[in-house]
Image: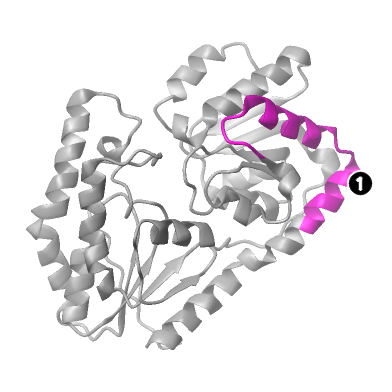
Amino acid sequence: CGVNIYRKNLQPMNMYLLSEDNKSKVLKLKKLFYRISDMFFNKKLSNIFEDFINGRNYDLIHTVNNMYFLNKYTFWRIAKNNKLKVFHTIHDPSLICMRVDMDNKSSFLDYIWRCKYKKHVKYVDCCLSPSQYILDLHKKYGYNFIKNTIIFNPVVTDMKVGKFEDKDNTIIYAGTISEYKGVMTLVKSFQKINDEQELIKLKLFGEGSIKQKIKEITINQSIEVNDFLSQEKLYEEISKVKVVVLPSEWEEAFGMILVEAVYNGTLIIGSDRGAIPEVMNKFEQFIFKAGDVDDLKSKIEYVMSLNKEEYEKIINSMQNEFKKYSSYNYVNRVENAYKENL
């Protein structure tokens, strides 16, 4: 279509050092050093950004939030100095808080962190957010973007409807296996159910600080703790089970696994944190109070009790609602955002 796209993949920092799951004092100090260094002293990135921009006739620069390199404001300033339009997508609260698992506590360093970024958002022509929740959260902390628009994260797959009779009484969780993701709440809910009747299984897919702990405390229980799978294999696993749970206890910016599950014909349960209720929209009966073991237990039992007709009626309704998360809609909305600001 006559559009050239240049992507710059930066050498990432050590995600392990940046993780709040890491309780080692030594590694916490290393993490803090990287953050402060990135905030004030990192000239190498400025040179990388300059080299990337110079010599090419760009129309726009589009950055995204991530937990690798964190002084994106340098890139914004350099881009504006080169008379480029700047677009930025916020995928998480990393412009608000230096820690991965943001809570209600705010440190002095968090305050400095926000001051640095808020000073530079004037260079961003348009902010793209996957949810109203995460945009409002940034506004709450004083981020005033020139323009903003909500563009849901896309699912790059067609709707699939797995046969109810082929689905196991199994729960799947896929993602970071950490406290702030609510995985222990899910495990405890599952254990309560199985204390009463051993009729279901739980499969966890991912990596994280409590992965080994869960393996140790759930020996001889119907819990599988697995490594990450490829997207194709994960979708295959999801299509074979009755429910996917996202039990997050932090500020989720979207909750992609929920949409992916519905696209693969499987019902979902999510906590009430972050943008999860926004993504799940009118399906309140599948939203539980974050950290509430009994509430999650009741939601799981409800899904497992559904018969074929009830299950298929709900999944059909969800799939109709979730069509808005298609890759086609995403591309159109991003294209419109570019056109309106160029």
Q: Disc 1 designates what residue?
A: 309
The relative height of residue 119 versus residue 82 in the rendered view (above or below) is above
Q: Quadrant of the C terminus?
A: bottom left
Is 62 left or right of 182, judged from the image as shown?
A: left
Q: Amino acid at mark 1?
A: Glu
Q: In this view of the protein, can residue 159 be seen by the observer?
A: yes
**Residue depicted at 26% across the width and 40% down the height:** 107
* Secondary structure of the residue carrying numbered label 1: helix
The relative height of residue 254 versus residue 21 in the rendered view (above or below) is below
**Residue depicted at 26% across the width and 63% down the height:** 118
- Residue 186, horizontal then vertical, whole percent: 60, 28
Range shown magenta: 288-317
The relative height of residue 46 versus residue 296 in the rendered view (above or below) is below
- Residue 58, horizontal then vertical, whole percent: 27, 83
Residue in the foreground of this view, choosing between 292 and 323: 292
Residue 291 magenta: yes
